[in-house]
Image: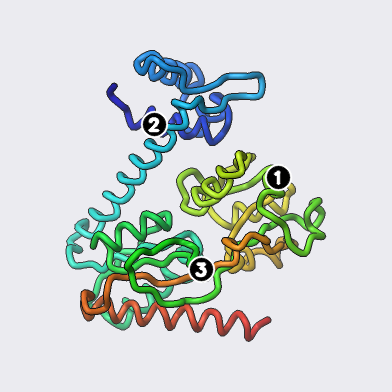
Amino acid sequence: MAYDLTDLRLFLQVVDAGSITHGAQRAHLALATASARITSMERTLGARLLIRNRRGVTPSPAGWVLVSHARQVLAELARMDAELTPFADGMPSAVVVLANTSATETFAPSAATEFLKRHPGIDIVVKELPAQQIVESVTNGHAELGLIGDTVDVGQLETAAVRPDPLVVVASSGHAVAGRTQIAFSECLSHPFVGYAEGRPLDEHLIGRSQPLGLRPRYRARLPSSEDVCRAVAAGVGIAVLPALVAARWGGALDLVMIPISNSWARRNLILCSRRRTELSEQTLAIASHLLRAGAEQDTVRHGGA
């Protein structure tokens, strides 16, 4: 069976939306086109991929297998893009720093910019990827440094603490969960979600955490930026799970409530991972030291202003 990347992306959109109609909208395809593509996939495979019912669609056993492999295929493409990016625009010697959503939203780009101002002879590429892909890329030598949560298995990589990086539930002040002092992630799944646009590492992480529960977040909206997500939450569209530092940037101005998540995986720290220091170039070591200082300074400012 030949697999088309558009079909794989469409299938994941449909599965995540729980609806062919909404999946087609997310994939920017007409409903008839999307339906025909999925039907063609099923016909070619000779097995049903989706179980259709009045509430929408869910993957069949064959569909879940396709979900797993499709995510891996698209993740490989993202990794390929990360590896090729340094060669664009005459930057073959750029140091590649891969980061999770929290790091890219709160300090990695600004820390890299500050470093570049001081070191005009060094180039940096900052790329956002899911944590497990970051670990694989750093382990395989496709990236020099990674910024991830400490709940991820890093194998033989060396790590250093950057700063605390807990995940919190963000809700409007009038939401049903707003009065809670903490909340389990499983309880959140009974409420509509607002999240990032498809493919962002944090939402991939949350989907992974929900699968063992036999549930998944129901997204009413997927939006391009943290500000957009927080404004939708403030308007009562749904709740969101965000890094606490990301949520804090908009919480006060938008009258949002941040509720700690009781699951242990949400009480994470941001860490810097790399291969052995003896394998790193002087440029990479200098960048690593700068990132660690920037993270520590950010944490000091956060506690000093509390």
Task: List the residue tagged with mark 3.
Answer: 106
Q: Residue at x 37, y 30 (%)?
A: 6
Task: List the residue tagged with mark 2.
Answer: 8
Three-letter residue code for mark 1: Val
The numbered mark, 3 or 1, whose residue comes first in the sequence reads 3
Q: Residue at x 45, y 61 (%)?
A: 152
The residue mark sitting in front, 2 or 1, is: 2
The numbered mark, 2 or 3, whose residue comes first in the sequence reads 2
Q: CA distance from mark 2 to mark 3?
A: 32 Å
Q: In this rendering, does residue 199 appear at all? A: yes
Q: Is the residue under label 3 in contact with that under label 2 (CB below 8 Å)? A: no
Q: Position of residue 213 (x, y in %)?
A: 61, 44
Task: List the residue tagged with mark 1.
Answer: 237
Q: Residue at x 79, y 52 (%)?
A: 175
Looking at the picture, does residue 83 appear above or below residue 278?
above
Dot 3: few (<14), some (14–19), or many (≥20) neighbours within 10 Å? some
Three-letter residue code for mark 3: Thr
- Quadrant of the rendered image containing residue 70: top left
Q: Is residue 265 left or right of residue 79?
A: right
Looking at the picture, does residue 273 appear above or below residue 232?
below
Q: CA distance from mark 3 to mark 1?
A: 24 Å
